[in-house]
Amino acid sequence: MQATGSFKERGALARLLRLSHEQRARGVCAMSAGNHAQAVAYHASRLGVRATIVMPASTPVVKIENTRNYGAEVILRGDTLDEAEARCRALQRAKKLALIHPYDDPDVIAGQGTVGLEIFEDLSDLDDLVVPIGGGGLISGIAIAAKGMGAATKIVGVEAALYPSFQRALEGREPPLGGATLAEGIAVKKVGALTLPIVRDLVDSIALVSETDLERAVSCFATCLHAMAEGAGAAALAAVLADPRRFAGRKVGLVLSGGNIDPRMLAAVMMRDLEREDRIVSFRVTLSDRPGLLGLIATRLGEAGANILEVSHRRLLLDVPAKGVGVEVTMETRDRAHAEEVLAALARDGLAPQRIGPGLADPIGD
C-alpha cells in the first residue's frame, strides 16, 4: 500500500534521512532487483538527492521503468543481484556516493522493523507471523520489534526453494545455485552480515516454497483478496498453502510485502492456476475427416455447459492420418468434476479425447 508498492520505502527513507549534508550533496547509490530501487529513487527525489541504481538485467521491466520515472539513473548489470552489487560498490568508491543497502544496514533494518511495530500494536496475540525473507532486512526488523514489544509470536521466514540462502547459511552449507524464480525480490544468494546473526537468534524457523506454491499464492491474493501480489510478496501465503496443517488452529499473520508484478506475468500466473484446477482444459480429438465433426464437438460442449476458448483444426501434421484430422480444443469448465463430465461425454460419442498438458489422465473414455 506504499507509494512504490512495497515495504522497502520504510528502510530506504530511514537511511536517507540519516545522511549528512555532504552525503546528500554527493548523492547515493543502491543495488536492487526492483522494489528497493524504486523506494530509494522515490524518496531521494523527494529529498532532492541524486540517486544511481544498479539493477540486474533480468529485473521485470515494470520495476526498471518505475525506478527511472522516479528520477534515478538506472544501470543494468549482470543477471544476479551479486553482479549488480559489484558494479554498485565500484561506483560508490569512484564517486564517493553513500550506499543505501537493501538489507544489510542498521537504519534500513530499523525502518523495515516498523512493519512489526504496527502489526504487534494491532495484533499482540498472534501465534505465528510469516514473513518473506531475501537478504533478511524485513524479517530482522520485525523479529527485533517482536522481542522489544514482548510478543510471544513465532517468527517464520519463507524463502523460494531455488534460493534457500538463509536455511543453508544457518546450517553452514554452501549457498544455493539458484535459477529462474517468480520471487525475484527474494532471490538472494548472499545473506547479510548484519541480518544473519539476528535471524539465527530471533527467527524460529524457515520454510521453503516451490514455484507452484508461489504461483498459487499470487493467484489467490488476486482472486480471493483482490490484492496485487508479486511472487516475493506472496511468499508468506505460499508457505501456508503449501503446509496448511502446520498452521491449523493457530492465529497466523502474513506479511504481503510487495505488489509490483508485471501485468503479463500476473495474467500468465492466473491462467496457469486455472489450468491446475482444471477450469481451463485442452484436449485433442483425432478422427477421419468428415463433415460436421467440429459441429458435433461444439454441440456436445455446449450441452455440457463448457465454454470454448480456442479451436485448432490440423490436417498436415505427421501424427495425423492422411485421411484424418486433428482438432485441438481449449475450453473453460467450472471445476475438475465438470471437466471429467465433459470429456466423458465426448468419449461416449466415440471421439476419444486426449488431454493436452497437466491434469486428468489420458485418454478419457469407457
Image (cartoon, rainbow, N blue to C red):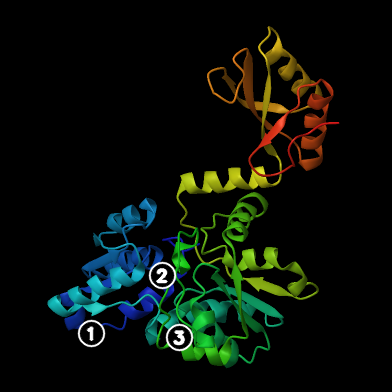
Between the residue at mark 1 and the residue at mark 3, the CA separation in whole angstroms equals 24 Å
Name the amino acid type tagged 1: Ser
State which quadrant residue 358 falls in.
Answer: top right
For image coordinates 67% across by 47% down, the residue present is 276
- Where 114 sits versus 216, above or below? below
1 vs 3, front mark: 3
What element does badge 3 sit on? helix
Q: Position of residue 218 (x, y in %)?
A: 58, 55
Q: State the residue at coordinates (43%, 82%).
A: 109
Query: Which residue is tagged 3?
Result: 195
Residue pointed to by mark 1: 20
Nearer-N-terminus badge (2/3): 2
Q: Is residue 288 above or below residue 330?
A: above
Q: Residue 312 or 47: which is nearer the viewer?
A: 312
**Circle 2 is placed at which residue position?**
9
Q: Are the residues tagged 1 and 2 within 8 Å (C-beta)?
A: no
Q: Is residue 280 above or below residue 276?
A: above
Instruction: Say the numbered circle drawn on residue 125.
Output: none
Task: Locate residue 120, reporting x and y percent.
Answer: 62, 81
Please tell me which of labels 1 and 3 falls first in the chain: 1
Can you tell which quarter of the image residue 339 is in?
top right
**Residue 74 sits above or below residue 23 on the image:** above
Which of pointers 1 and 2 lies earlier in the amino acid sequence?
A: 2
- The local secondary structure at tag 1 comes to loop
